[in-house]
Structures are given as C-alpha cells and as structure tokens.
Amino acid sequence: MDFEIPNMSVALPELFVLGMACLILVIDLFLTEKTRIVTYLLAQATLIGAAIASMAHQFGAPEIAFDGNFIRDGMGDTLKVFIYLSAFVVFLYSRSYLQARNLFKGEFYVLGLFGVLGMMVMVSAQSLLTLYLGLELLSLSLYALVAMNRDSTYASEAAMKYFVLGALASGMLLYGMSMIYGVTGSLVLSEISGQVATLGADDMVLVFGLVFTIVGIAFKLGAVPFHMWVPDVYQGSPTAVTVYIGTAPKIAAFAMVMRLLVDGLEGLHPHWQGMLVILVILSLAIGNITAIAQTNIKRMLAYSTIAHVGYLLLGVLSGTEAGYASSMFYTIVYALMSLGGFGMIMLLSRAGFEADKLEDFKGLNERSPWFAFMMLILMFSMAGVPVFLGFWAKLSVLSAVVDAGLVWLAAVAVVFSIIGAFYYLRVVKLMYFDKPVDNTPLEGDIDVRVMLSANSLAILGLGLFPGGLMGLCTRAMGL
C-alpha cells in the first residue's frame, strides 16, 4: 500500500479519533471515580475535533487514498458530522444516567469512540475489505457495550443474542462479498462496478453474492426478517447503550447500503430493487403492527425502528440520485428523533428505576408540562404529523418512490404509516389525559435538560424550515 503523506491526510479524522481513543484508554487507567469526568470531557473533545477535521474538507473534490480502498467525499463528510453529533449527544445524555447506576466507567466512552471509528471507516469505505473492517470494529464495540452492566441478566442475554446473530450475519455478508470478488476479481467498489457492467446483470454467481450481501445489510439495519435481535437488544441494554445503538450506527448502515449497492453493484439494480421491496413491505408491516402490542417503551421504539428502516430503504430502492438524497435525509432525521426519544426515557429514569414502561409516562404533563411538550414534539414527528420534521422525511422518500413509478408501494407505505401513528399518539394520550402513577419530580442535570429541549425544538424548527437540511443532503449527494 502507498502510505504517502497526502494519503494519510485524507484519513485525518479517523487517525485523530484512533489516537485520542488510545490516549483516553491509557489516561483512564490513572483516574479515580471522582476524576472520571476527565474521560467524559476528553471523549467529547475528540468528537468536536473530529467534526472540525471533517468539516474543513466538506464538499471538496472527492479524494481516494490507500490504493483505492478509502474515499473522502461530500456524502461521507456530511454523514460523519452527524455521527459525531449523535455520539456527542449520547455521551451527554448518558453521563448522569451511568453515574446513578455505578456504570460511569471509561470503557463506555472508549468503546463508544472505537464504535465511532468503525462507523467512520464504513462511511469512507471504497472496497469490500475496508467496509468489512469498519463493520466489525463497530460490531465488536457494540457487543461489549450491550454487556457492560454485568449485574444484569437481561443485558448479558441481549449481548449473547446480539453476538451470535451478528456473527451469523457477518458470515453471510463475507460469503456474499467473496462471491462478488470471485466473479469480478477485485475488492475495490469502483472496479467491481465496471466489471458488473461488463458481465451484465444476469450472471448467476453475482446474483447469489448479492443475495448474501443483502442479508448482511438487512441484519445490520434490523430489517424484517432479520430483525429478531432488535427488540431484545434495545430492551436488555442499559438505556445509555440503547440510545447509542439506535442512532449513529443507523447513519453508518445507510452509508454501507450506498457504498455496496450504489457505488459497487448499481448494475444489479433490477435485482436488488426487488429484494429491497420485499424487505420494505415486511419491515413496515411487522414493525408497525407489533409495536402496537408493546407495553415497554424501549421495545415499542425498537419495533418503530424496524418500521423506520422500511421507510429509509424506500428512497434507496428508487435508484435515483434524488431518492438517495431523500434516504440520507430520512436517516439523519430518524437519528435526531431517536436521540430525543431515548433521552426522555433517561430523563424520567433515576437510581433504581428505569422509566421504560409506557405507564411511566402517564400524567407527565402534570409533573413537567415542558418536557411533556418536548415528548409530544418527538412523538408527532415520529408519527409523521405535518409541519414536524418526520413528516417531511416521509414525504421525501414517498415522492422518490412515486417518481420511480412504484405508486403502489408508496400507497402501502402510507397505509402502514397511518397504522403506526396509533402507538405514537398513545404516548401523547398517556402524558396528557391519564393520571400520573409516580409523582416524583423529574431529576436530571441542567446540561441534559438543555440538550433535550434543544433536541426537540430543533425537530420542530427544522420541520417548519426543512429546506436547509434537505439541501445539505442533496448537495452531499452531488446534485
């Protein structure tokens, strides 16, 4: 490989995060419980530094480094900035939650940063090998994070399920990649794309490789029928870990879809479009209908995630640049909404009490009218109520599908969106029309309260003026 200085500068944000994560790991060894806040502050500083490094290059000409294995482009830099933002907010929300449960350990932040590094590598991957390395770095960090609370049998069970199923999915993905490599003779996505165009879309080995690759992607996204890990992992993990899993990795998974299917296998679009249509319909149906039956809000939001993955894939399967931009917009919006939703659960929680049941939200308006209103904004946005940000996200992917001539699929998505509105509006009903089960005043540090308010108000503000964020996504896609 060619390790010239220009090559290294292309990967500057990744090198910075790697160096800081290793440094924080060493520094944390010498810290006591009282000084562990230093680890938290260094982790946040790392994310800010990486964001500055990524934004310095944003929308510059695409640069390819490391013999074609790594790319830095507008889409990658934009997605990375939102990954940093998500991780920054997760760390901020989690601090007081972890302190109250004696889980405020350096491992959370070090693993979180290594997970961010894995996501960054996935976002900038330009070869099958780089993509797989980034994915495994992220996955191994997540397995350890889920099992972080060693006293919880639920967390241990969730981590074991996640690990076993994740290993199976990684094997499938690797098998699919090996078949693609066997046919095309290359690991670099741009070269694979050229070979696919030469071989044609009817090469059976290529199609089989695509099937296994789609299985791996569907598992990482949590699409039906590869969704079985999502509810158990969301419910069993400490909420601080759940909010991490439910936000930034979804942005990285979208990048993985774009790199594999669009950059590498666009010549097989007729095949993967049909596969994604099946995943979308199943995810929308199972996700929305099963969420109605849940009494645990983390489990409800897990099934809601499965449904949102269905909407996310709508833009991708359209096969158009505008569709890809709308999917990117949807992914970012979903991450912002998830941050707020799980942040509210952590705000209502306290030592010895997890506010993870729907009944814990009863009468929230009487306990805290302001945060009841913040939760209302989040639920309305997730339901796709007009003027809230979630509405514009759904509208953009549905428009892309209609423009691609799949009007029937857009109609199916709208029907399931109406069904899905029920369980979001049920939370609003519990907050405003039911009597509180628990009258304990809301605890929470001032920084968490301010960030949670900013998170929710941003969703309202961006919903009123969605053009800026949509324009950013369109520009990132090079339109």
Image (cartoon, grey):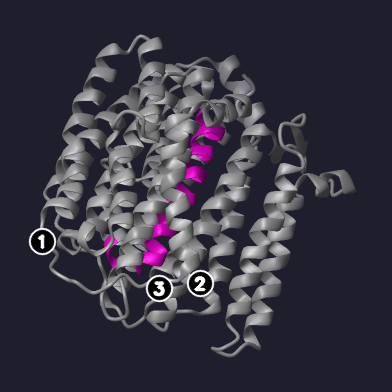
* Residue 140 highlighted magenta (yes or no): no
Q: Is residue 172 visible?
A: no
Q: Which kind of residue does numbered mark 2 sit on?
A: Phe
Residue 206 image offset from top left, x and y in percent? 48, 27
The residue lying at 19 percent from left, 64 percent from top is 360
Write down the region rendered in magenta. 235-261
Q: Which mark is residue 97?
A: 3
Label 1: which residue? Answer: 435
In front: label 1 or label 3: 1
Label 2: which residue? Answer: 108
Magenta segment main secondary structure: helix
In front: label 2 or label 1: 1
The answer to whether 327 appears left or right of 425 in the picture is: right
The residue lying at 58 percent from left, 90 percent from top is 32
Q: Compute the Cα span from label 2 to label 1.
A: 37 Å
The residue lying at 42 percent from left, 19 percent from top is 318
Q: Which kind of residue does numbered mark 3 sit on?
A: Tyr
Q: Compute the Cα span from label 2 to label 3.
A: 12 Å
Marks 1 and 3, the one that precedes in the sequence: 3
* Residue 248 highlighted magenta (yes or no): yes
At label 1, counting other C-alpha atoms closer than 10 Å, the crowd grade (few under 14, some 14-19, many 20 or more) is some
Q: Which kind of residue does numbered mark 1 sit on?
A: Lys
Marks 2 and 1, the one that precedes in the sequence: 2
